[in-house]
Image: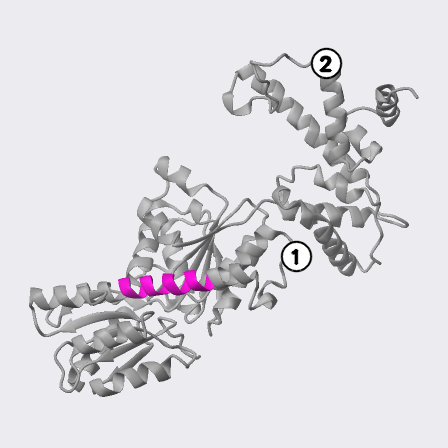
């Protein structure tokens, strides 16, 4: 399997001591998982190397620069890099522990300054911090470029997502900008909105060499979660007669997708946080850590901020997960997709049931647009499959869809009655009146309701009458009465 590079851009190590370059390279790769490394022990070659690398697929984005070198000093190179390649981040790693040198380098544009004798953990954290900042800058530039041109560079990655919604297109542009990042991606949205499809698209866009490995973590206790993700050594527990790799290892070089992350137990949240912070994990029964080579994507239908306030989700884990975040709109917020999805699911159902694709009444998309769809796209799919299973000939029957709309209206009426009984502020009636203006008469309200129903039904009187809960003749009578006599 081809090893994935981290970070996406190159990291150039510059020092006249070849032994220090080898030692630093090993430290970064073994303990930091940083393997997209280039080395240079001659300061005179640095600028040419940077110019050449900027034309490659993975240009240099970070330079770790020694301060005291023959020919060109680190301070001279720092000035030249900032002038000719301002997009590149520079960290000074010097043998000199001098405050004046550090301050001068920071004034000249260095991101940070470390002494070679600095403890390894602090140095690694500083380099990772610079990598995260550089990744964010590149992502912001890519997102701005796509938003300005309103373009998608890889539309084929979203072929499985049926939409023409501007909201979804903006999400696609954002995903293209952050897909190559090594940082986690948090996908939020109601059940049935297609979060797994978004995760699949993000994995395709990442162009990672490994597989997409999916696991639903809802209901997993701490031991099962740890064994599923981290694996175990032989003899780790009763019945563990052989070692088993976890899903993290299976996703090496690829993506690990954890669905329903909001239901993860507090004990398992601690283990996941360590994995994300340190990039390493311990298989059960092992005292030797392994490095994770997988990018983590998580999804939830829960409100994680609400669960934090309830003490059911760790704040530090949430802030680690939401570095990149998308919110998938509910189907009722992207009703322009209803005709597309209706045709898509009809074709899909017809193929599975070995039937021809039926036509349907022109008012069906209008009828569906007035339904709340609490189950979102998954519910629409189930409705279409059920309707086609009952279909025999001619146009697709609307009876099941009409029945659903009536149930939806009745449930809302019951909710309104319940809110009046309980006095709950959260369930107040949606219509509010200005206390400073006269109260409208019943006749005026009747007229306003009829106008709104006709607007929602696109002037289809049959559908408007159903929305109002009256018969079509009764609606026609109201409309005739409202028309002035000629």
Residue 107 image point, x, y percent: 18, 64
Q: Residues within 10 Å of mark 2 (few under 14, many from 20)?
A: few
Q: Which of the 4 image quarters holds residue 350?
A: bottom right
User: Is residue 176 positioned above or below 429 on the image?
Assistant: below
For the C terminus, which image quadrant? top right
Residue 352 image point, x, y percent: 75, 59
Horizontal side of 200 relative to 286 (left or right) equals right
Q: Which of the 4 image quarters holds residue 4?
A: bottom left
User: Is residue 168 positioned above or below 474 on the image?
Assistant: below
Q: Is mark 1 on a helix, strand or loop?
A: loop
Taking the spot 64% from the left edge, 22% from the top edge, the residue there is 414
The answer to whether any part of residue 283 appears in the image is no
Q: Residues within 10 Å of mark 1 (few under 14, many from 20)?
A: few
Horizontal side of 414 relative to 20 (left or right) equals right
Give the numbered dot on residue 162: 1
The answer to whether any part of residue 87 appears in the image is yes
Residue 373 image point, x, y percent: 65, 40
Taking the spot 37% from the left edge, 69% from the top edge, the residue there is 293
Q: What stretch is highlighted in magenta?
A: 129-143
Q: Is mark 2 on a helix, strand or loop?
A: helix
Taking the spot 36% from the left edge, 72% from the top edge, the residue there is 6
Taking the spot 50% from the left edge, 21% from the top edge, the residue there is 425
Magenta stretch: dominant secondary structure: helix
Residue 448 image point, x, y percent: 72, 23
Task: Name the residue nearer the viewer: 68 or 419.
Answer: 68
User: Is residue 342 positioned above or below 375 on the image?
Assistant: below
Residues under numbered marks 1 and 2 in contact, where contact means CB atoms less than 8 Å apart: no
Is 248 covered by the magenta stretch?
no
For label 2, the residue is 442
């Amino acid at each position: 399997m081809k090893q994935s590079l981290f970070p996406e851009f190159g990291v150039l190590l510059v020092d006249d001591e070849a032994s220090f370059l080898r030692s630093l390279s090993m430290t970064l790769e073994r303990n930091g998982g940083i393997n997209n490394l280039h080395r240079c022990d001659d300061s005179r070659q640095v600028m040419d190397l940077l110019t050449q690398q900027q034309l490659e697929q993975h240009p240099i984005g970070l330079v770790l620069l020694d301060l005291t070198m023959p020919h060109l000093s680190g301070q001279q190179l720092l000035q030249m890099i900032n002038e000719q390649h301002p997009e590149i981040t520079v960290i000074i790693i010097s043998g000199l522990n001098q405050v004046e040198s550090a301050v001068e380098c920071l004034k000249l544009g260095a991101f940070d300054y470390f002494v070679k004798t600095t403890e390894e953990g602090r140095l690694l954290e500083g380099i990772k911090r610079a990598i995260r900042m550089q990744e964010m800058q590149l992502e912001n530039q890519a997102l701005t470029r796509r938003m300005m041109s309103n373009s998608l560079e890889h539309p084929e990655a979203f072929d499985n997502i049926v939409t023409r919604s501007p909201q979804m297109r903006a999400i696609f542009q954002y995903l293209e900008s952050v897909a190559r990042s090594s940082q986690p991606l948090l996908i939020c949205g109601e059940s049935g909105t297609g979060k797994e499809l978004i995760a699949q698209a993000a994995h395709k866009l990442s162009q990672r060499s490994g597989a997409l490995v999916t696991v639903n973590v809802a209901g997993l206790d701490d031991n099962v979660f740890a064994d599923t993700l981290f694996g175990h050594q032989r003899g780790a527990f009763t019945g563990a007669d052989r070692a088993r790799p976890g899903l993290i290892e299976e996703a090496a070089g690829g993506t690990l997708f954890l669905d329903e992350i909001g239901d993860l137990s507090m004990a398992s949240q601690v283990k996941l946080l360590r994995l994300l912070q340190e990039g390493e994990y311990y298989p059960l029964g092992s005292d030797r850590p392994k490095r994770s080579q997988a990018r983590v994507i998580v999804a939830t239908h829960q409100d994680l901020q609400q669960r934090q306030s309830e003490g059911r989700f760790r704040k530090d884990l949430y802030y680690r997960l939401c570095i990149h975040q998308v919110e998938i709109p509910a189907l009722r917020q992207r009703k322009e997709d209803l005709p597309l999805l209706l045709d898509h699911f009809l074709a899909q159902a017809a193929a599975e049931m070995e039937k021809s694709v039926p036509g349907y009444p022109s008012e069906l998309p209008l009828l569906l647009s007035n339904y709340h769809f609490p189950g979102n796209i998954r519910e629409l799919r189930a409705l279409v499959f059920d309707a086609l299973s009952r279909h025999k000939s001619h146009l697709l029957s609307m009876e099941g869809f009409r029945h659903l709309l009536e149930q939806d209206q009745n449930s809302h009426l019951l909710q309104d009655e319940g809110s009046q009984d309980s006095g709950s502020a959260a369930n107040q009636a949606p219509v509010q009146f200005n206390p400073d203006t006269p109260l409208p008469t019943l006749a005026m309200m009747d007229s306003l309701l009829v106008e709104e129903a006709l607007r929602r039904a696109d002037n289809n009187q049959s559908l408007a009458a159903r929305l109002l809960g009256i018969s079509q003749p009764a609606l026609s009578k109201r409309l005739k009465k409202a028309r002035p006599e000629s």
